[in-house]
Amino acid sequence: MKKFLTIKEASDFLGVSEKTVRRRLKSGQLVGRLEGKYLIDNRSLRGLKDKMSSRVDRLDNLVQLKEFKRQINDLIYQVKEAREESRELRSIIYNLAEMLPKALPSPKKRWWKWWEK
């Protein structure tokens, strides 16, 4: 790769507009020199690209973090729903267990225990 790039080449390399490259030259984020047209130092371009990619990585991490938080909230909601359903089912089972002795026929007296009531 060349030691110095034009503004057009630098914008292509960084994936930004030429206007953005000029703004970054003016702010000091990029190092360049004027020789009829601006020539930008390749090392400063690589440094800025690394910073930009680490910023993109951080943004990706934030997006993933938000997605994980959403998934956690969904799971918490599902657990609460499952607990409520479990409570309702336990209540139904308890009520049915209480009704069961009443629903079954009483056992017949055995003929050899006629003296017991």
Image (tube, helix red, strand yellow):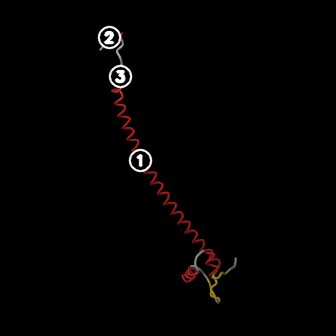
Q: Residues within 10 Å of mark 1 (few under 14, many from 20)?
A: few
Q: Earlier in the sequence, mark 1 or mark 3?
A: 1
Q: Amino acid at mark 1?
A: Glu
Q: Which mark is residue 81?
A: 1
Viewer-nearest residue: 35 or 78: 78
The x, y position of residue 11, in whole percent, is 61, 78
Q: CA distance from mark 2 to mark 1?
A: 55 Å
Whether label 2 touches label 1, CB < 8 Å: no
**Residue picked out by circle 2:** 114
Whether label 1 touches label 3, CB < 8 Å: no
Q: CA distance from mark 1 to mark 3?
A: 38 Å
Q: Residues within 10 Å of mark 2 (few under 14, many from 20)?
A: few
Q: CA distance from mark 2 to mark 3?
A: 19 Å
**Residue picked out by circle 3:** 105
Q: Amino acid at mark 3?
A: Pro
Residue 54 higher or lower than 6, as above or below: above
Q: Which residue is found at the position 42% from the left and 51% from the top?
A: 77
The x, y position of residue 99, in whole percent, is 34, 30
The x, y position of residue 80, in whole percent, is 41, 48
- For label 3, the SS is loop
Q: Earlier in the sequence, mark 2 or mark 1?
A: 1
Viewer-nearest residue: 6 or 102: 102
Residue 61 higher or lower than 43, as above or below: above
Q: Amino acid at mark 2?
A: Trp
When asked about the image quadrant of residue 91, the answer is top left
- For label 2, the SS is loop
The x, y position of residue 116, in whole percent, is 31, 13
Q: Is residue 103 left or right of residue 75?
A: left
When asked about the image quadrant of residue 102, the answer is top left
Q: Earlier in the sequence, mark 2 or mark 3?
A: 3
Q: Is residue 80 left or right of residue 32?
A: left
